[in-house]
Amino acid sequence: MLQKKHHIFARLDKETARKQWSDRFNNRAPATRAKGNLTIKAQADGSTDILLYDEIGYWGVTAKDFIAQLGSISSPSIRVRINSPGGDVFDGLAIYNALKQHPGEISCVVEGLAASAASFIALAGKRCVMAENSLMMCHCAWGFSIGNKADMMETAVILEKIDAQLAGVYAAKTGKSPGECLAMMAGEGKNDGTWFTAQEAKDYGLVDELLASSETTEQPDAQPENKHDDLARRVRAMRARLAIAERD
């Protein structure tokens, strides 16, 4: 009987600890999420540009927001212009799949950075073009967990499955094997990813064409309505990441 009571108390303590940790982490995020910087621009030739100039996920452009905007576009040709550090892998995959399934002709242009989730979103189009002075970064999935060793092992298994799915996306584009793409994502055995210049990305098969700097598209003129709110949002996001890194 005493052992049973002890077990119940231990379980309650663990659940309380999980909730407190979760509440503490969630409190670092803004109480109400400001929508990310996603701009839609109709072109004179009847095509449409989507400017993905933000993070992917909660602190930037969510899949829900992106897909809602994508569904409102009836143009036969859509160009996704990317300058993003990436973000949430599941939002990224949802955006990737929505672009792949769209009936219009999709092309993607990396205008500054396509890192992490943005790197495989860039591959969703029929063609992927990179500005010659832009960069792309691919890496294995990141995450965090709380709990005992079983929880940690479960997280590792899930991360391994995500890596396999992403390697399949890169392999489908490059024609390389998933194993080769996994090694590329790991980055020389350090698990810190691989950075590509535009030419290196083209040589690897991730990119179809390079765009000279004189040919780059005009820069977006749409900015967040409140620059101070946008800066505060980014600072909060950075603090959350730093806090996670410190715990690691």
Image: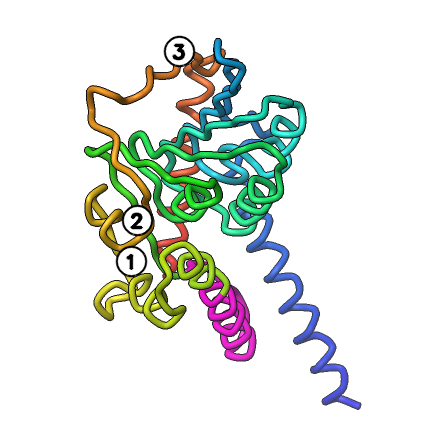
Residue 122 image-quadrant placement: top left
Earlier residue among tags 2 and 3: 2
Report how far apart the C-alphas of labels 2 and 1 lie in the structure. 7 Å
Cβ atoms at labels 1 and 3 below 8 Å apart: no
Residue occupied by mark 1: 193
Residue at the spot 43% in from the left edge and 48% down from the top edge: 120
Disc 1 marks a residue whose amino acid type is Gly
For mark 3, give the secondary structure: loop
Viewer-side residue, 131 vs 117: 131
For mark 2, give the secondary structure: strand
Cβ atoms at labels 2 and 1 below 8 Å apart: yes
Disc 2 marks a residue whose amino acid type is Met
Residue occupied by mark 3: 221
Residue 168 x/y as whole percent: 46, 63
Residue 137's disc is: 2
Q: Which residues are magenta?
A: 141-164
Residue 131 x/y as whole percent: 26, 32
